[in-house]
Structures are given as C-alpha cells and as structure tokens.
Amino acid sequence: MGKLYVCDHPLIQHKLTYIRDENTKTKDFRQLVDEVAMLMAYEITRDLPLEKVKVHTPVIEAECQVISGRMLGLIPILRAGLGMVDGILKLHPTAKVGHVGLYRDPETLQPVEYYVKLPTDVLERELIVIDPMLATGGSANMAIDVLKKRGCQQIKLMCLIAAPEGVKAVQEAHPDVDIYVAAVDDYLNDHGYIVPGLGDAGDRLFGTK
Ligand code: URA
C-alpha cells in the first residue's frame, strides 16, 4: 500500500490555517498556497538520490554532493493544481510541467479526460501529480491512470488537504503511489466538499467566486 505522509511542519500548519480562513482574500490565498507548495516540495523530494562531485572551494578541492540523475515532472490537474506549481518550481527549477485536464460528467459524475500534454521525456521522470484537494479520489485516480496508460511508473501524489475517503480510494486503486498532504480532514459532505476544508480551491485561487 502507498504511504501517506502528512507534512506537519509548523510553518506548513500555520500557513494552512490562513488558507482555510474564509476571510483570506485571493491574493493572500494564492501566495500562501504557493509557499506551502514550496515547503511541501522540500518533504516530497527528501528521497532524491545524491551523487558525489568534486568542487574547488577557495580553500581546497572538496568532495560534495549534488542531486543525481532522476529528473522531476510536475503534473497539475487543471485547474486548481496550477496554484501549487510555481512554489515547487522555486525549489526545482529544472522540473518540467505536464497538464491533465479532467471534467466531471454530469450524468455519471465520473471524471473524464479532456486535455493531456506531457513532457516528451515523461517516462524518464519521477512524476508528482498535483491537486490541492483530494476529495473522493476520482480525479487523482484518473490522472494517475492517464499517466500509467502512457507507461509512467514513478508517481507521487501531492495535495494540500485530503478527505479520508480520497486517501482510501487512491491507496486501493494505486498502491504503488505515495501520497503527500498537509492535512487529512474529517469527512466529505453531501456536496462533495472536504470538511472543514477550505471551500472550492479553484475558485479561491482564481477569484472566480
Ligand atoms: N474540491 C475543492 O475545491 N474543495 C473541496 O472541498 C473538495 C473538492
């Protein structure tokens, strides 16, 4: 089963509180999401392998370390996932970014793919699927399916807030995918919102409500 990592660093928890607050305006909401994404990127890349390199310091030739080989691909699920991309890119500016667009079929209520654009070398990259809210898990599972159908294997999922239902759904469908979140909330309400949550992440990021 995929592991669930709750990034409980005090800075992340502090900022998440203001992200949840309904009085936080769009500009601050966006900035806080960006900052939390950057802090979470620090946790999610903790297992990146290092290799030894020689560096001439002003004093001596020293053996130091740099991140080796494995390259990252960020895969935001449109549209709310976009809000976390820049924060991660601040720490990993060489990551490439693919996009997966999904909409919910009004009759079946199932997510349907409408847009997929991935880096050409996607199979060589470790991929981070990004969606701020892991609610039912339907969109995350479909985005991971989209990647696996194209042969991708190394996939992590990064969300701000998860409902227990969403965590369970992803762990069952994709036991090879580790999940990174800032919080696991209480439950999903009848309208599909995470409780206590933060409301509609896309609307709050883009000021569309
Ligand atoms: N998507 C959101 O934006 N918010 C929720 O609470 C659940 C899904």
Image (cartoon, helix red, strand yellow):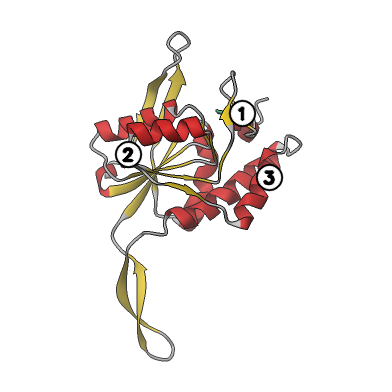
**Given this view, does label 2 or label 3 mark the residue nearer the observer?**
2
Indicate which disc residue 175 carries. Answer: 2
Q: Amino acid type of disc 2? A: Pro
Say which residue appears at 41% left-offset and 30% top-offset.
Answer: 169
> Within 8 Å of ligand 1, the CB of disc 1?
yes
Could you give the CA–CA distance between mark 2 and mark 1, rounded to whole angstroms?
27 Å
Q: Is residue 191 left or right of residue 67?
A: right
Q: Quadrant of ligand 1?
A: top right
Secondary structure beneath label 2: loop
Could you give the CA–CA distance between mark 2 and mark 3, rounded to whole angstroms?
30 Å
* Closer-to-camera residue (120/65): 65
189 in relation to 48, above or below: above
Residue 71: image location, x then y, percent = 33, 54
Q: Earlier in the sequence, mark 2 or mark 3?
A: 3
On the image, numbered disc 3 is attached to which residue? 17
Secondary structure beneath label 1: loop
